[in-house]
């Protein structure tokens, strides 16, 4: 068990990956997910990755080092005395306490490489289920409500599935799935049966190498529409939902180089949802505000760090406006661009992470009601943590990394065991990788 209190400065070995170095292409690779963490207020559950000028602080005074036991758990060690500082008074008693951060060891779920992860209740039993993208398929694992999953059900796909999104496409009260089939330039529409199974795929042609997927009602007709970020063609395909689970082509938006993630978020507070697109190659976020009838304003581009890999959309500073965070793999940091409430973003503020962060997602890991961030640290074989520690301002403290499977590339967040604290699912796209779960242990 890991009970992280007090917080300590995160010091990890930097691993530099140049922006042009990619290892998640179609050749035998499960690829990355849609790399987006977003709220579910638009009637959808987005794939893994969907998720203003306030003072920024970062505490770098606390000090401790970490050691790992054979079971993969982490122990905090006081650097001056060598004493074990693990085990706050309430860790493991099952009662969440505000400010208490407790995690058990990483536990393997499967050894099949997985880059796309998304959580949602597919069978209506109140427990979160897991979808994972693999080479040539995606899988469904029904949650058992205790942090574990049933045996996987594999659903064939025409290529590696590098993005997944869930939403009720046909208004029948059950979640449907959309898979980004990067190798054959299609998205697969899979209508849910309400028991964790899906019907046959309806394939729709999109741009070249689709990666990011986002659902939202752009035209105000109460039917979910779909936006697809196409990495190789550098554009976004907009598909209009027709209400029965089908889609029709609407338009194409040109964005920056190598768009790999996309989110539907209301950046101007006016509704309907706007679009934010993460451009890996350009190191930018393209923002399109949605206008009446489902059309979009011209692109507004905002600079992130180098080699950004995911979008995390949350109100990090508590001012009521959504902000956007990105893990920047070549910079070893996490950048936050605060929303200004009118559809724009302020200049990025950077928080060191180390470990070549490949992905990130937000959750509340210490029961204090503030958004924290979990990062897949590909260069450290660990999940990194950034904790929001002050309400009403942008402020993160870095926590000791949680050891996990080799070269993690994606994380998904949700309360898997019903204890009121968010847990972490982590995947690795590497050969011999797989899926692991790190349960909170309040």
Image (spheres, helix red, strand yellow):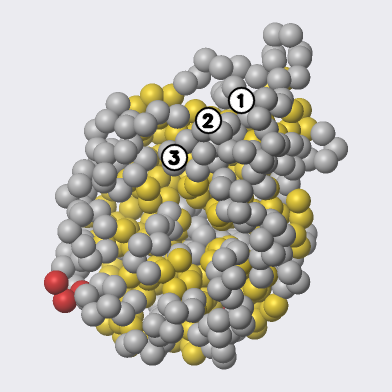
Quick one: quadrant of the C terminus?
Answer: top right
* Nearer the observer, 268 or 389: 389
CB under 8 Å between discs 2 and 3: no
Which one is earlier in the sequence, the residue at label 1 or at label 2?
1
Quick one: quadrant of the N terminus?
Answer: top right
Q: Which residue is mark 2?
A: 99
C-alpha gap between disc 1 and disc 2? 8 Å
Mark 1: secondary structure: loop
CB under 8 Å between discs 3 and 1: no
* Nearer the observer, 75 or 145: 145
Q: Which residue is mark 3?
A: 369
Q: Is residue 45 left or right of residue 55?
A: right
76 versus 199 height, above or below: above
Image x and y of residue 99, in percent: 53, 30
Image x and y of residue 25, in percent: 58, 66
CB under 8 Å between discs 1 and 2: yes
Q: Which image quadrant is residue 252 in? A: bottom left
Image x and y of residue 132, in percent: 62, 67
Mark 2: secondary structure: loop
Q: Which residue is mark 1?
A: 5
From where the camera sits, is residue 180 visible?
Answer: no
Which one is earlier in the sequence, the residue at label 3 or at label 1?
1
Q: Which image quadrant is residue 121 in? A: bottom right
Residue at far right of view:
70
């Amino acid at each position: 068990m890991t009970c992280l209190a007090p917080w300590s400065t995160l010091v990890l070995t930097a691993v530099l990956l140049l922006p042009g170095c990619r290892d998640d292409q179609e050749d035998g690779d499960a690829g990355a997910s849609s790399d987006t963490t977003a709220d579910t207020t638009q009637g959808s559950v987005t794939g893994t990755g969907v998720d203003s000028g306030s003072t920024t602080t970062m505490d770098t005074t606390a000090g401790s080092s970490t050691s790992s036991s054979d079971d993969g758990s982490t122990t905090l060690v006081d650097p001056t005395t060598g004493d074990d500082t693990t085990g706050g008074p309430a860790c493991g008693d099952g009662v969440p306490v505000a400010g208490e951060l407790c995690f058990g060891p990483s536990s393997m779920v499967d050894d099949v490489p997985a880059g796309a992860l998304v959580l949602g209740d597919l069978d209506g039993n109140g427990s979160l289920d897991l979808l994972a993208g693999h080479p040539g398929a995606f899988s469904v694992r029904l949650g058992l409500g205790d942090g574990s999953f049933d045996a996987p059900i594999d659903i064939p796909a025409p290529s590696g599935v590098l993005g997944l999104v869930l939403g009720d496409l046909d208004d029948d009260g059950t979640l449907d799935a959309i898979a980004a089939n990067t190798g054959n330039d299609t998205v697969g529409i899979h209508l849910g049966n309400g028991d964790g199974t899906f019907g046959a795929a309806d394939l729709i042609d999109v741009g070249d190498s689709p990666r990011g997927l986002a659902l939202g009602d752009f035209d105000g007709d109460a039917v979910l529409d779909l936006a697809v970020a196409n990495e190789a063609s550098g554009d976004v395909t907009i598909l209009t939902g027709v209400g029965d689970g089908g889609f029709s082509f609407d338009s194409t938006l040109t964005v920056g180089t190598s768009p790999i993630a996309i989110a539907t978020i209301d950046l101007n507070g006016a509704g309907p949802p706007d679009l934010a697109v993460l451009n890996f190659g350009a190191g930018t976020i393209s923002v399109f505000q949605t206008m009446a009838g489902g059309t979009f304003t011209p692109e507004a581009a905002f600079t992130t760090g180098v080699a950004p890999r995911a979008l995390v959309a949350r109100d990090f500073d508590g001012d009521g406006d959504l902000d956007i965070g990105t893990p920047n793999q070549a910079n070893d940091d996490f950048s936050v661009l605060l929303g200004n409430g009118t559809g724009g973003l302020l200049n990025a503020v950077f928080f060191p992470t180390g470990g070549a962060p490949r992905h990130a997602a937000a959750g509340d890991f210490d029961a204090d009601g503030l958004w924290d961030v979990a990062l897949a640290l590909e260069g450290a074989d660990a999940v990194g943590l950034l904790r929001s520690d002050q309400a009403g301002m942008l402020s993160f403290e870095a926590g000791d990394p949680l050891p996990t499977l080799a070269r993690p590339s994606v994380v998904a967040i949700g309360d898997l065991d019903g204890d009121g604290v968010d847990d972490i699912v982590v995947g690795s796209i590497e050969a011999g990788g797989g899926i692991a779960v790190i349960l909170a242990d309040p």
